[in-house]
């Protein structure tokens, strides 16, 4: 993931880009002959050059869909750069260009069995997680309750010598992933059972899944800047 800005001295232009899938946020705003950008809205507000006026339509979209559709943001004068896009700043103009798009799926000509694709996908996930465990700071994981974060934590545990530090959302998801065993013959062994709480409390389903060393249970719980000035400007940087 990345959000970066590069000054191309030969072409006298700035290129500000956001990673292909939009993992890293990148917000920008125009203020006269200034282009301001930051990875957080508060960074733009801290400049004192952006009016904190709300975008009512964008907030309405957020309340309807649960997110702000890019390029809209909560602030009327701030835009969000779309994933896989770049801001090109040259000759006093700012343009948006797309440099990547999600590749369309195409049927494989080799017609391999589904199990072969499943094993390849798991191997790629395992390698991806292993590479990202190289860090000089403590590692941790956020459990949202979905299968994606659960598998990531389980793969982390496979490559770590100590239990994974993990947090959870308020959905009541717990994950025990201090060990990992995955013989080839049991890669896709799943078990699902549904039980209920005792009769004195509301009926709350409890779902448990097991996948060769991964154990996940749903348990009842209580609720509980930067700035860029055009080189053509008469004002000094």
Image (cartoon, rainbow, N blue to C red):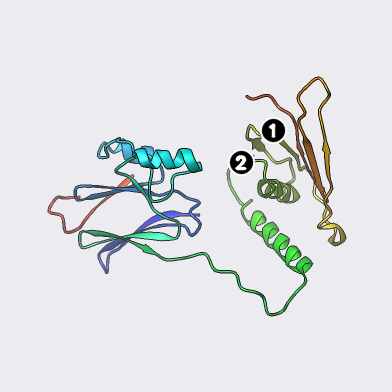
Residue drawn at point x = 67 percent, y = 38 percent:
165
Residue drawn at point x = 27 percent, y = 39 percent:
50
Q: Residue furthest top?
A: 200
Res 162 quadrant in image: top right
Q: Left of 110 or right of it: where is 26?
A: left
Res 222 quadrant in image: top right
User: Looking at the picture, how far across and down is residue 113, in whole percent?
Assistant: 78, 71
Which of the numbered marks, if any, corresponds to residue 138? 2
Closer mark to the observer between disc 2 and disc 1: 1
Q: Left of 117 or right of it: where is 60?
A: left
Q: Going from the N terminus, do you reach mark 2 or mark 1 first?
A: 2
Asked whether 211 or 71 is in front, the reply is 71
Q: Left of 10 or right of it: where is 56?
A: right
Q: Judging from the image, what secondary structure is the residue with disc 2 in?
A: loop
Residue drawn at point x = 67 percent, y = 45 percent:
146
Q: Which residue is mark 1?
A: 172
Q: Judging from the image, what secondary structure is the residue with disc 1 in?
A: loop
Q: What is the CA distance from the residue labelled 2 to the residue labelled 1?
A: 24 Å
Asked whether 52 or 193 is in front, the reply is 193
User: Looking at the picture, how far across and down is residue 53, in whole percent?
Assistant: 29, 36
Res 140 quadrant in image: top right
Disc count in the image?
2
Q: Indicate whether 226 appears above or below 200.
A: below
Residue density around tag 2, few if under 14, some if 14–19, many if 20 or more, within 10 Å? few
């Amino acid at each position: 993931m990345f959000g970066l800005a590069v000054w191309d001295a030969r072409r006298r232009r700035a290129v500000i880009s956001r990673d292909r899938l939009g993992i890293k946020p990148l917000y920008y705003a125009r203020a006269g002959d200034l282009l301001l950008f930051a990875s957080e809205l508060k960074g733009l507000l801290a400049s004192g050059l952006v009016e904190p006026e709300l975008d009512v339509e964008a907030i309405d979209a957020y309340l309807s869909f649960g997110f702000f559709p890019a390029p809209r943001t909560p602030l009327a004068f701030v835009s969000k750069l779309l994933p896989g896009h770049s801001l090109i700043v040259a000759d006093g103009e700012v343009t948006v260009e797309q440099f990547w798009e999600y590749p369309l799926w195409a049927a494989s000509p080799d017609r391999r069995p589904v199990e072969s694709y499943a094993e390849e996908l798991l191997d790629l996930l395992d390698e991806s997680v292993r590479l990202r465990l190289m860090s000089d700071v403590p590692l941790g994981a956020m459990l949202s309750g979905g299968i994606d974060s659960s598998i990531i934590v389980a793969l982390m545990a496979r490559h770590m010598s100590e239990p994974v530090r993990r947090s959870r959302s308020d959905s009541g998801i717990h994950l025990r992933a201090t060990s990992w065993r995955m013989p080839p013959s049991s890669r896709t062994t799943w078990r699902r059972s549904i039980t209920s709480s005792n009769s004195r409390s509301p009926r709350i389903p409890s779902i448990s899944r097991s996948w060769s060393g991964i154990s996940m249970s749903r348990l009842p719980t209580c609720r509980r800047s930067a700035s860029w000035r055009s080189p053509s400007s008469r004002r000094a940087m």
